[in-house]
Amino acid sequence: MMQQYREAKARHPGMVLLFRMGDFFETFEEDAELVSRVLGLTLTTRDGTIPMAGVPVKSVEHYLRKLLHAGHRVAVCDQVEDAALAKGLVKREVTRVVTPGTVTEDELLDAARPNHLVALAFARGAYGVAWVEATTGDFCAADVPPDRLADELNRLNAAECLVAEASLPLVPDEVKAVLPRAVTGRPDWTFDPETARGALSGHFKVITLTGFGFRDDQPCVAAAGALVIYLQETLKSSLAHVLRLRPYRADRHLTLDEVTRRSLELTRTLRDGQRDGSLLSVLDRTVTAMGARALHDAVLSPLAERPAIEARLDGVAEFLRETGTRRDLRELLEAVPDLQRLTTRASTGRASPKDLAAVGRALRLLPKVKAKVTGRQAKLLHDLDGRLELCPDLRELLDRGLADDPPYAVKDGGVIREGHSPELDELRRLAREGKDWLARYQAEQITKTGIPSLKVGFNSVHGYYIEVTNAHQAKIPADYTRRQTLKNAERYITPELKEYEEKVLTAQDRALALEAELFEKIRGQVAAQTHRLLNTAEVLAGLDLLASLAELAASRRYVRPQLVEDPVLEIRDGRHPVLDQTLPPGTFVPNDVLLGTDTGRFWLVTGPNMAGKSVLIKQTALITLMAHVGSFVPAASAKVGLTDRIFTRVGASDELTRGHSTFMVEMTEAANILNNATPKSLVILDEIGRGTSTYDGVSLAWAITEHLHDAVGCRAMFATHYHELAQLAESLPHLRNHNVQVRELEDEVIFLHKIAPGSAERSYGIHVARLAGVPKPVLDRAAGVLAELEARHQLPEAKRRPVVDPPEKQKRRKPREENGPTLFEGQT
Ligand SMILES: Nc1ncnc2c1ncn2[C@@H]1O[C@H](COP(=O)(O)OP(=O)(O)OP(=O)(O)O)[C@@H](O)[C@H]1O
Ligand SMILES: [Mg+2]
């Protein structure tokens, strides 16, 4: 048996092999050590030498999920014949290969998030990246410049990444840090451009990929080919659900780097990494899994082109106006199952009877959905309507073919509806009538023998039998033949019973076999319509997305943003989308942010700790982003200039795993902004230069502000406690000072959360420390030190001056010397 195990193991290199032994799936040797660690199982041994650990067959899905999440690939080696009937060693085969990037089972997936499988090809000048959502067949590729690779991979948040074995050691550290746990080394030949192209041409039945918008020699084409080869190998099925390869055009999307996505808390919070509290969580009013995934994608890759954004906004606006339609449509959609993932399972031959029944349910709802969409004005809605296929032929087939509530497994029977196949109906009748016969036969035998406790029964090893307890053995008729001896009874067979057994068992077996055959056929017919079904599923996702954004706009009183080409931002009474929903109603204080030629495009925001600076600048970034998603925004009005990138850097963090200290992280992020921002970008800085000494910090913040203002010319908001930066307003024409206000009452400070022109003078840090529960002696001492420092403000001149400017520039923008003490205020 161990030999059988080792053979299976050798055919699935790099995978954990679960080996069926009776009621358990066992693992051996290094796999056993691994799973006992990952799953917390007891490690035992087989024959006292071979390490072994197992999981019960009935809970294998639960353990599979854990293994996948830990980034492992798993091959399930099952018994493929009945152990009771096997002569010698039970036959076993790998019946299922499950990897994090190719799973299609709902129980192993998060319904609201795409599950990406990525392939990475190394080439000169750019990386070839291809990715597929294996559960929906959405397949894209793009060549990505080295400095964007980490960001793109981070956006994709892949479950699994394929890399050619020879390239594994070449993966740069910063890329390694964003790769998923499951990095699968693949044979180098699968990434060979020639082979890869061959795989794609074979799959798509095209000679060249130019029709899809690619050049055949692009590195990403090699990655895409390697990915197709891997899918064919692991899914061991048709890839009909992978309909086309789309080029991902970065310039059609507003670029967000990894740091920005993280610090804006788009899909999960900074604090605990949970979805709750993220932008996505407050925007999400979708009612289908397909819509939820579409929103997830939309938030992570907002649009950059005006027509596309306006099209979405038009759709949202129409659903917002048409309250009744929206309500009805959402009610309908709520009942629609996940047609994308269902179709994919049908197309890869994995759909269960329940899955196909769900497809049927979805199709039955489509005419009603269409009725709600037909005749809409918005172009996008009109397009969606045109693409929504009702597939009546398929619906009829499923309605006619499948029983009302079919079981999960075909082998349980009862999958096919009565009347679908006369042959099946006949077999079923035979089997059923057989059962009546059995009851009659038992009654007859009781009368004939005079044994009231006589029973006719069945077991899978011995078949049908008549059981008579030992007390009545004397009354056994001559035509009874002994079949089996039990402790208190004997079991017999008679010629009639034998004949019956053959008839019924064959009828049942044949009915089941026929059902399986008919089911396969129906599944094949559904699979043949993969293209239409996926198209329709995409329409449903789009409708859900637009209706949910409209629902959100209605319930939170959002307004339609006005998009303009000029790099301006005019938000009146803007609110933070998350706090607006999580704070008690009416407590959030809205604010105006006006970035533009007359109002200054660089706002320096000062104000006490806890005043609301971070909230204000973040909400500005979020409102801008939401506008580019095509969503309405939380404000009284918003004019948003088209934006190519949003950059944010927030607070202090370290990334020790990447070998970066706190300040190193801060400066790397600053460098990224300074090098990549354009006049169409929006830059949000929340404290910069805080992780080093005061003088170094002020000097850097000073120089960064000047550079963004003069050289880049982008829209920017910078929240800081370096009050001396306020002087820059005198020399930088587009910079304006604003502060978030507080009111001082005796020794209380009241946070007004309202922004006003001008800079703040104090940070009230000690006050906030008191609110936070810092012990009184420490507060008193701090107040003393502060007073002393403020009194002793004469500092050596050289130390106060930013040191990075060339001497002539320093003269122009020298910080005012008499402002010495404010340096310390910045540190309160
Ligand atoms: N506009 C607002 N309306 C109501 N509450 C607000 C508003 N802005 C901020 N707050 C509340 O004040 C808290 C502190 O805000 P924020 O983090 O923006 O302060 P800050 O000025 O950045 O402080 P620090 O200088 O310490 O970083 C928020 O968590 C929120 O609860
Ligand atoms: Mg802050």
Image (spheres, rainbow, N blue to C red):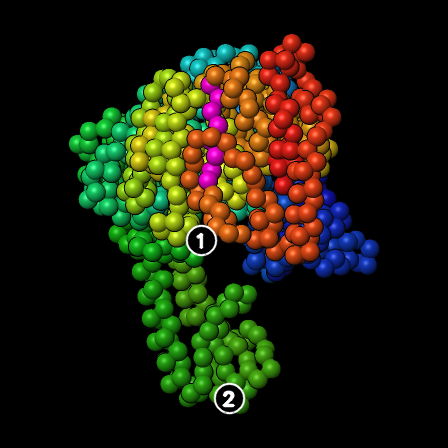
Place of residue 592 in the rendered image (x, y in percent of width and height, measured from the top left) = 38, 33
Instruction: Give the label on residue 65, or none.
Output: none
Camera-side residue: 120 or 692?
Answer: 692
Residue 796 among magenta residues = no
In the figure, residue 121 lies in which quadrant?
top right
For the question of whether residue 98 can be seen, the reply is: no
Residues in magenta, as a range: 734-741
Residue furthest front as drawn: 791
Q: Earlier in the sequence, mark 1 or mark 2?
A: 1
Place of residue 218 in the rendered image (x, y in percent of width and height, measured from the top left) = 55, 14
Place of residue 731 in the rendered image (x, y in percent of width and height, measured from the top left) = 53, 17
Question: Residue placed at 45% from the left, 12% from the top?
Answer: 210
Camera-side residue: 459 or 440?
Answer: 459
Label 1, label 2: how far apart the Cα atoms are: 42 Å
Query: Magenta stretch: dominant SS?
Result: strand
Residue type at the position of mark 1: Ala
Residue 738 among magenta residues = yes
Question: Residue placed at 43% from the left, 44% from the top?
Answer: 752
Does 638 appear above or below 407? above
Question: Residue placed at 53% from the left, 52% from the top?
Answer: 747
Residue furthest left as drawn: 375
Camera-side residue: 733 or 686?
Answer: 733
Q: Is residue 173 left or right of residue 744?
A: right
- Residue holding disc 1: 409
Q: Secondary structure at mark 1?
A: loop
In the figure, residue 786 lies in which quadrant?
top right
Q: Is residue 567 left or right of residue 821?
A: left
The C terminus is located in which quarter?
top right
Q: Callout 2 environment at 10 Å: few (<14), some (14 to 19), or many (20+)?
A: some
- Residue holding disc 2: 472
